[in-house]
């Protein structure tokens, strides 16, 4: 029997793969719903993604895996824009505004001195060769104006960090070393849209995995919080249908303490966020104490609007703001970005993001959306809304945390998966969990999809690479508003967030 702690993406990938390979599997998820940081909720009668709505396409195997599950991968519609007092579209054929072609009209048109960008083609390869940050390389090759006018607003909005502090992406650095100009290095890394999603929403992914895992015989228990680990045993509280359900799956459960069930397993898989993992892991391995960095503050105001004036997507798939220029950090125009959503409803769907952990009034979101989208939106146009505070759910992946995670000596009989082990985002979590399933099964690495080493785990292009779930309690309102019924098509539950419907 293999016991899995956590029913987010990592835990569910493992459950599905191991069960389909004939292993007996039991998965414990403390929340009523599965999916972790990939939840959906109902807005104006439609199931929409409330958490991750996309994955980075840097590893084609991830798209193939999604397809193999019977889900339909899709690409986003429209470009993103930047607001720095003025609104402008992120240049096409570029990475973070760094053009693959020095004559790119989107870039040239925004600069007083475009010739400085073109000097990239004349400079020797030694210029910028020692750069360790993106800012350093861009300045050296293409000049200060491109950096401050275009690259810095984009990078600051996407990664919440100035390019002078953003470590040079290893792939971009390697391409520059190989090709000798920055524009050629960018061109070599471009391959269509940076992100993709799934028809019907990203939240279909965990739900489908759970469905397939169950079909292969895995037992998945929601509302089952793991309170401790011991070598060969998982301690679970309020495990719903203990006895019966456990017995059916062959779990030998012996209640030792009121309400706590001891489930004996041969292999333990910890697939929780970092904050919970640090509490659980010392039960089965030696673990240096680590201070968990404070999570990024994020509040999302999800809006469904009667707003035909947004139908053409005045700011494409959405807009990111330069710090200090607007209260809101970003807007995703969800119904323009994902065409299936537009087909599903007459409403326009917006997600307005704030770098705070507090209730944001709907009136603020409407004012900010009006400013950023260039369209006057009024309160009476709001059909439905849902404000979601992510608390500390988005733990930054600091060097200290990465070093600590990489240094863990995980004993046999234990696996540790999930975003804080795998690197940032879905495109790192999924192959890492698959590689671990291969390892447990003694399968050739990559039997499912490219293994953990098959892709860089540095900074992705998407902006919300969360690490670890918040351990803050979820209030009841958010649980019910987040479409509680686990297993209902298109609806997964949230992890660690606090939400409120207007
Ligand atoms: C708002 C938002 C937007 C995002 N956007 C993107 C994006 O566009 N692209 C992208 O690639 N990534 C994005 N991400 C990140 C992505 O969602 C995560 O990296 C990924 O889903 C993490 O999966 P996981 O399985 O590692 O962890 P989680 O999803 O955190 O799952 C862990 C699970 O363990 C459960 N658990 C914890 N403790 C216990 C316990 N003691 N007992 C039982 N169960 C427990 C939790 O309830 C949770 O369900 C986003 C995240 C957020 C929050």
Image: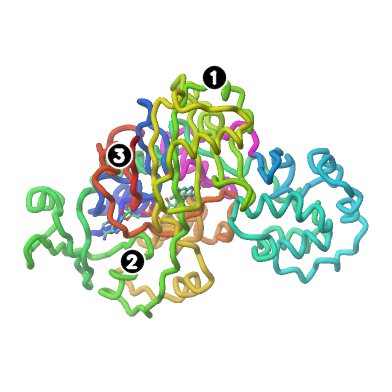
Position above or below: 90 against 174 = above
Left or right, 417 with respect to 25, comes to right
Give me the residue at 13% from left, 52% from top: 246
Mark 1 to mark 3 CA distance (whole Å):
37 Å
Q: Residue at x 44, y 40 (%)?
A: 301
Where residue 419 appears, as percent x and y from the top left, is 44, 58
**Residue 76 can be seen in this image:** yes
Spot occupied by residue 214 in the image (x, y as percentages of width and height): 26, 43
Name the N-terminal-most of marks 2 and 1: 2
Magenta-colored span: 51-80
Q: Find disc 2 in the rendering and name its residue.
A: 277
Magenta includes 74? yes
Q: Local crowd at mark 3 within 10 Å, few (<14), some, or many (≥20)?
A: some
- Quadrant into which the C terminus falls: top left
Q: Which of 259 and 447 is in front in this view?
A: 259
Q: How crowded is mark 1: few (under 14 residues within 10 Å), some or many (20 or more)?
A: few
Q: Is mark 2 on a helix, strand or loop?
A: helix
**Mark 3: secondary structure:** helix
Residue 211 is marked as 3
Taking the spot 29% from the left edge, 75% from the top edge, the residue there is 282
């Amino acid at each position: 029997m293999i016991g899995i702690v956590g029913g987010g993406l990592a835990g569910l990938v493992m459950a599905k793969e191991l069960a389909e390979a004939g292993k007996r599997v039991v998965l414990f998820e403390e929340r009523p719903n599965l999916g972790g940081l990939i939840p959906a909720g109902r807005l104006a009668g439609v199931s929409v993604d409330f958490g991750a709505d996309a994955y980075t396409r840097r590893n084609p195997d991830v798209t193939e895996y999604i397809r193999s599950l019977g889900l339909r991968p899709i690409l986003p519609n429209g470009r993103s824009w930047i607001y720095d007092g003025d609104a402008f579209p992120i240049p096409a054929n570029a990475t973070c505004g760094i053009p693959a072609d020095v004559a790119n009209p989107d870039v040239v048109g925004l600069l007083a001195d475009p010739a400085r960008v073109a000097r990239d083609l004349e400079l020797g390869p030694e210029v910028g060769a020692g750069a360790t940050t993106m800012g350093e390389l861009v300045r050296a090759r293409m000049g200060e104006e491109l950096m401050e006018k275009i690259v810095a607003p984009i990078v600051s909005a996407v990664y919440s960090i100035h390019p002078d502090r953003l470590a040079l992406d290893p792939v971009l650095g390697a391409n520059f070393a190989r090709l000798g100009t920055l524009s050629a290095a960018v061109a070599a890394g471009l391959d269509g849209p940076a992100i993709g999603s799934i028809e019907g929403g990203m939240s279909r992914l965990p739900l489908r995995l759970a469905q397939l895992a169950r079909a292969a015989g895995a037992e998945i228990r929601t509302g089952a919080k793991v309170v401790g680990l011991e070598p060969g045993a998982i301690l679970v509280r309020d495990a719903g249908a203990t006895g019966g359900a456990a017995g059916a799956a062959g779990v030998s459960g012996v209640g030792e303490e009121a309400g706590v069930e001891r489930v004996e397993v041969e292999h333990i898989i910890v697939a929780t966020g970092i904050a919970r993992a640090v509490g659980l892991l010392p039960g089965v391995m030696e673990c240096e104490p680590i201070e968990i960095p404070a999570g990024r503050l994020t509040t999302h105001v999800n809006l469904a609007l009667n707003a035909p004036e947004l139908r053409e997507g005045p700011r494409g798939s959405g807009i990111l703001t330069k710090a200090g220029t607007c209260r809101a950090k970003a807007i995703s125009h969800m119904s323009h970005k994902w065409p299936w959503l537009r087909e599903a409803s007459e409403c326009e769907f917006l997600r307005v993001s704030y770098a705070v952990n507090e209730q944001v009034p709907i009136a603020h979101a409407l004012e900010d959306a009006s400013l950023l989208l260039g369209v006057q939106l009024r309160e009476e146009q709001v059909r439905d809304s849902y404000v979601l505070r992510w608390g500390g759910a988005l733990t930054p992946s600091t060097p200290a945390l990465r070093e600590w995670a990489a240094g863990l000596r995980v004993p046999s009989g234990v696996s540790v998966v999930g975003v804080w082990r795998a690197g940032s985002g879905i495109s790192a979590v999924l192959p890492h969990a698959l590689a671990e399933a291969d390892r447990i099964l003694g399968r050739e690495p990559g039997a499912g999809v490219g293994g953990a080493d098959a892709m860089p785990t540095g900074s992705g292009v998407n902006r919300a690479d969360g690490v670890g779930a918040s351990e803050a309690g979820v209030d009841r309102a958010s649980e019910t508003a987040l479409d509680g019924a686990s297993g209902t098509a298109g609806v997964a539950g949230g992890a660690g967030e606090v939400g409120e419907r207007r």
